[in-house]
Amino acid sequence: MEKLVSLCKRKGFIFQSSGIYGGINGCWDFGPLGVELKRNLKEHWWYTFVLSRDNMLGLDASIIMDPQVWVASGHVEQFHDVLVDCKECKKRFRQDHLEGEQCPECGGELSEPRAFNSMLSTRMGVSDDSAVEAYLRPETCQAIFVDFKDICSSNRVKIPFGIAQIGKSFRNEVNPRNFIFRSREFEQMEIEFFCREEEEEKWFEQWQQDIWSWYLDIGVKEEKLRWLEHPKETLAHYSKRTVDVEYKFPFGWGELQGLANRGVYDLTQHSKHSGKDLSFFDVLNKERYIPTVIEPSAGADRATLAVLCDAYAEETVKDDLRVVMRFDPKMAPIKAAVLPLVKKHGLAEIADTLEKRLRKKFTTYYDHSGAIGRRYRRQDEIGTPFCICVDHQTKEDETVTIRHRDSMEQDRMPMDEVDAYILKRVSIRDVC
Ligand code: GAP
């Protein structure tokens, strides 16, 4: 984990927020490479679960909602962590994260447990006396329930259908830890899938399969994934059933995403608290009812961390250590680097023109400084799947070499075939 965190900082994937001020706990910034990686992941998710399906709709709702939303959802009442403080070293812990009855840091005596609401709040309004306390949403899904009526009346939807949203969520985590795994500001990718109650099990199983396939599609190794069923006694207040997808991180198994059967809980609560009828008229069955909700809820940061952990590899090549990020080409932040063998003899100009052409189709990088072997290694370290080398033969027959990151093998091909060759292998959508 330490090696990965250091590579992420050194290469500009992820660094701590406000670093020059000492850093703020639980907040992270995605640098130039990290932002591309996370965008690829979110785009892939959106394409898989929204754009390529005919019964899914998207939403991008505001982060701050009417405070009543969080009363209705149960968060004001129930979204608590139970905390204990160490009387010796003064550190604070979540009680459910402790194994013994002593402080895990210094062995000191712990205080009595007390509840602490995990929602982050802010004040909204221009003057002190008119300002009201509002919350930064702790989950994106509530907006989907609150906007349910508007979405249904503005679109022709038939049960079953789903609404998806990607966006920021905030939780005042007691112990943000394990790099971006547990943060105070993070991004969720959530779906609320509305179906008939008698079909809840069928859809739950279907979503289990679809979620699993998505992690494999983005290149996560299957042997590092597992399901965890929540026992009935530990289910969240809204859930009839929850299973988690877990990933084997270097620090142990951790939750990547949940899949919950929320039943009719949320729409019923918001109907009661808002006084608006959120039932649905099912034209096919000529019936009005509150649909049952199956919720696949994923974390974009945790999925990004899983992709980073899975990609990291070290190997010895000719007595030299090679660090290589073996990203699936669809996830790689830079798809192709264009490298002239040498700067002279007009090779740099040809490479520069080629790179400008490719840049319009996918992310590229141009580099002419240093020995070619060193340049290849720099690209390996950031996970670039293809390196195109413009050499002396290019001037004679307009061919270039393509070096493959994982095998380090090189093929020669006509320069005008490079675009299609790479595009086909790196595109999230089917480009053929
Ligand atoms: N709407 C349901 C819901 O929010 P959750 O299990 O609390 O369920 C869903 O959160 C996902 O959001 C988690 O599986 C995880 O991937 C991500 N997540 C939750 N808290 C997080 C945190 N503090 N830091 C990073 N990701 C988090």
Image (cartoon, grey):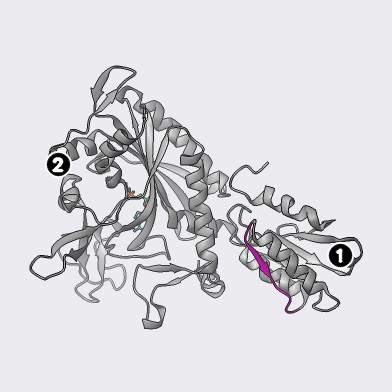
Q: Position of residue 383 (x, y in %)?
A: 63, 62
Q: Is residue 294 magenta?
A: no
In the shown orientation, is residue 111 left or right of residue 349?
left
Expressed as whole percent of the image width and height from the top left, the position of residue 235 reads 27, 42
Q: Earlier in the sequence, mark 2 or mark 1?
A: 2
* Magenta segment: 362-370
Q: Amino acid at mark 1?
A: Thr
100 vs 344, nearest the viewer: 344
Task: Say which quarter of the image contains residue 327.
Answer: bottom right
**Is residue 263 among what the camera can see?**
yes
Tell me the element at label 1: helix
Residue sitting nearer the eye, 366 or 154? 154
Mark 1 surroundings: few (<14), some (14-19) or many (≥20) residues within 10 A: many
Q: Check residue 394 in the rendering and tell me which mark sits there, or answer none.
A: 1
Q: Disc 2 and disc 1: Cα gap in Å?
A: 69 Å
Residue at numbered disc 2? 274
Question: In what element is the residue under mark 2?
Answer: helix
The one of 96 and 117 positioned closer to us in this rendering: 117
Does the beta carbon at disc 2 come under 8 Å from ligand 1?
A: no
Residue furthest left in the image: 129
> Please, what is the dominant secondary structure of the magenta stretch?
loop
User: Ligand 1 closer than 8 Å to the CB at disc 1?
Assistant: no
Q: Quadrant of residue 280?
A: top left
Task: Tell whether label 1 touches label 2 (CB within 8 Å).
Answer: no
- Is residue 113 among what the camera can see? no
Q: Residue furthest front?
A: 154
What amino acid type should be assigned to the residue bearing mark 2?
Ser
Which corner quadrant of the image does residue 347 belong to? bottom right
Indicate left or right for 371 with 258 as reference. Answer: right
Residue 309 lies left or right of residue 316; in this view the side is left
